[in-house]
């Protein structure tokens, strides 16, 4: 993606039909660039109503507008953009394939420091991509066991690498769009 525009900085991107279904005007965008040290922010400002079809694949033109003043940003700067479609804070999540559900009861295999394992019942929440949130039954820092498919067989994944927390403090640099205020001074667009 390349920065274009004079009066305001905009980024034009093309997204698949599946990706466009997950976004809306006003969604927050986080930008990074090899030419700049810090992240900066923006919003989804326009989504095309009609797709462009190339080789049987439909894509939609989406315009992203940079918010605030960003030092060192010039027309033609290449950037990477991440559109925030869901934000969860202080959420514990594990790979979905580490959870076994039988007769409506979900369990994970917890690995103790001495290497022994324990099947533990957990309460699950939303599935976000390849991860499922755990709302009860597991604590941050505990290790879990999961089976991963590898060429030539299966192996056991390391527990610590599989724990993930969503959220935390907002990154520095740039201004957040007007809207809901979060701790640390960052702001999210309204309706998030």
Image (tube, rainbow, N blue to C red):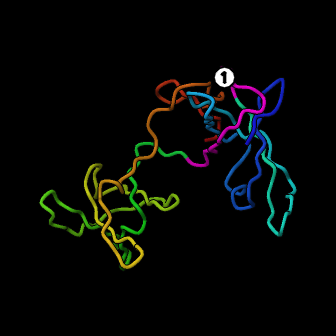
Q: Residues within 10 Å of mark 1 (few under 14, many from 20)?
A: some
Expressed as whole percent of the image width and height from the top left, the position of residue 53 reads 86, 63
Q: Could you tell whether 173 is left or right of 142 in the image?
A: right
Against 183, is 104 above or below?
below
Against 65, is 148 above or below?
below
Expressed as whole percent of the image width and height from the top left, the position of residue 179 reads 63, 30
Foreground: 12 or 42?
A: 12
Main SS class of the magenta portion in the image:
loop
Mark 1 falls on what kind of element?
loop
Foreground: 161 or 76?
A: 76
Expressed as whole percent of the image width and height from the top left, the position of residue 18 reads 70, 61
Residue 95 sits inside the magenta stretch: no
Q: Could you tell whether 173 is left or right of 22 in the image?
A: left
> Quadrant location of the N terminus?
top right
Q: Which residue is mark 1?
A: 70
Against 86, is 132 above or below?
below
Residue 83 sits inside the magenta stretch: yes
Q: Which residues are magenta?
A: 67-86
Expressed as whole percent of the image width and height from the top left, the position of residue 59 reads 79, 58
Q: Residue at x 62, y 44 (%)?
A: 82
Q: Residue at x 63, y 30 (%)?
A: 35
Q: Residue at x 76, y 34 (%)?
A: 3
């Amino acid at each position: 993606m390349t920065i274009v525009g004079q009066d305001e900085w905009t980024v034009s991107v093309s997204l698949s039909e599946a990706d466009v279904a997950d976004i809306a005007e006003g969604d927050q965008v986080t930008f990074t660039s090899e030419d700049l040290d810090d992240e900066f922010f923006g919003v989804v400002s326009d989504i095309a109503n009609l797709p462009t079809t190339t080789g049987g694949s439909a894509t939609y033109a989406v315009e992203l507008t940079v918010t605030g003043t960003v030092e060192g940003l010039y027309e033609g700067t290449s950037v990477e953009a991440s559109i925030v479609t869901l934000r969860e804070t202080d959420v514990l999540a594990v790979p979905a394939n580490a959870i076994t559900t039988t007769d409506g009861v979900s369990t994970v295999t917890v690995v103790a420091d001495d290497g022994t394992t324990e099947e533990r019942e957990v309460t699950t929440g939303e599935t976000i991509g390849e991860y499922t949130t755990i709302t009860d039954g597991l604590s941050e820092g505990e290790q879990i066991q999961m089976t991963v498919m590898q060429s030539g067989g299966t192996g056991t994944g390391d527990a610590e690498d599989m724990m993930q927390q969503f959220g935390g403090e907002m990154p520095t640099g740039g201004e957040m769009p007007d809207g809901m205020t979060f701790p640390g001074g960052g702001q999210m667009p309204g309706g998030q």
